[in-house]
Amino acid sequence: MISVGILLPHDYRLLSIAAILDVLEAANKIFKTNGEALPFNISLYKLADSDCESLNSFHGYPVMGIEEESQVDLILIPSFSTDDIRQTISKNQDYIPWLHEQFRNGTEIGTFCTGAFLLAASGLLNGKVATTHVDACPAFANAFPQVILRGDKTVTEDNGLFTSGGSTSSFHLLLHLVQKYCNKDVAVKIAKIFAIDMDRQNQSYFSTFQPLRDHNDNIVAMVQQKIEANYQEAETIEELIKDIPSSRRNVLRRFKQITGIPPIEYLQKIRIEAAKKLLEQTNQHMGEVIFSSGYNDPKAFRRIFRKIVGMTPTAYREKFQSN
């Protein structure tokens, strides 16, 4: 039997914990129905100063303090419900020594969505592949540059550390773990119970480009404004920044330092985001979409769109068009 420890951290997202419990309970039920030993022994873990301090059980499962002497086979970290991830990590930092101790003794660790931030804060993900919610990737990359971020991936596994992307990607990690600890037949049954598409490995097309604006660099802000106001007509970055009161070299350096990407990539993302909205909300011919989003070369547009979004423009329209 695999002992599973689910964290009850500060600011946990209830839906995330519910999904974890639902899938593990379903796996246990399959084995019970077949008269076999249950594969998962589930407990939850809290901090001494948490909102759950006086909680001894959670939906029938025991809640333990991390100070209690216990070793588990698998730790699962749910996603967080906060917009201030730094503060949340600070409030949960007492988990970090415990995570180190457990991992050192052979425990595997899985994170769901923004739960990856806590594992990354421990340093255990340094030099390893990870993913998180696709829209949280810029903040994650900025905070943890030593982690090999694969923001397009639904699930990653690296040396006993597992991460998943946002929302429904959590189910894909759970299926992965069920298959690992049980078998593929059980994973397929779980997929059918929860109507999960087992083959989805990419989450890029769920992303919405959200430019970083909470900085105090006026030069970078000016470049951002020029790109966003003139993305349809601009032919080169040099054309956009020619009136910026700073050298080209300084503008490019500061822009990448602040936003994490060079201006040309920022321009591409703004254009592709505009194209996505047109594909979702209008019936414009593909040629009109290409021109309206600032491209003259259909081949270049399709290549960049697929690189950023993870699918062709036509497939994106078929998947997300609302009318």
Image (spheres, rainbow, N blue to C red):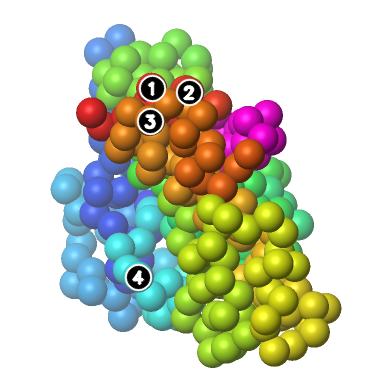
Does residue 81 lie above or below 87 as drawn? above
Q: Is residue 24 left or right of residue 266?
A: left
Residue 92 against residue 24 in the figure, above or below: below
* Residue pointed to by mark 3: 284
Which one is nearer the viewer's eye here, 282 or 111?
282
Q: Which mark is residue 318?
A: 1
Whether the magenta-drawn stretch holds residue 309 is answered as: yes
Q: Nearer the viewer, mark 4 or mark 1?
A: 1
Q: Which residues are magenta?
A: 297-311
Q: Tell me which amino acid carries mark 4.
A: Asp
C-alpha gap between disc 2 and disc 4: 34 Å
* Label 4: element kind: loop
Q: Where is the N terminus found, in terms of image quarters?
A: top left
**Mark 4 against mark 3, which lies toward the viewer?**
3
Q: Regarding mark 3 in the picture, which secondary structure is present there? A: loop
Q: Is residue 75 visible?
A: no
Label 4 environment density (alpha carbons within 10 Å; few <14, some 14–19, many ≥20): few
Q: CA distance from mark 4 to mark 1?
A: 32 Å
Query: Viewed as shown, does residue 258 lie left or right of 114?
Result: right
The residue that disc 2 covers is 314
- Residue 63: x, y in percent? 28, 58
Within the image, what quadrant is residue 263 found in?
bottom right
Q: Residue 303 bears which disc, if any?
A: none
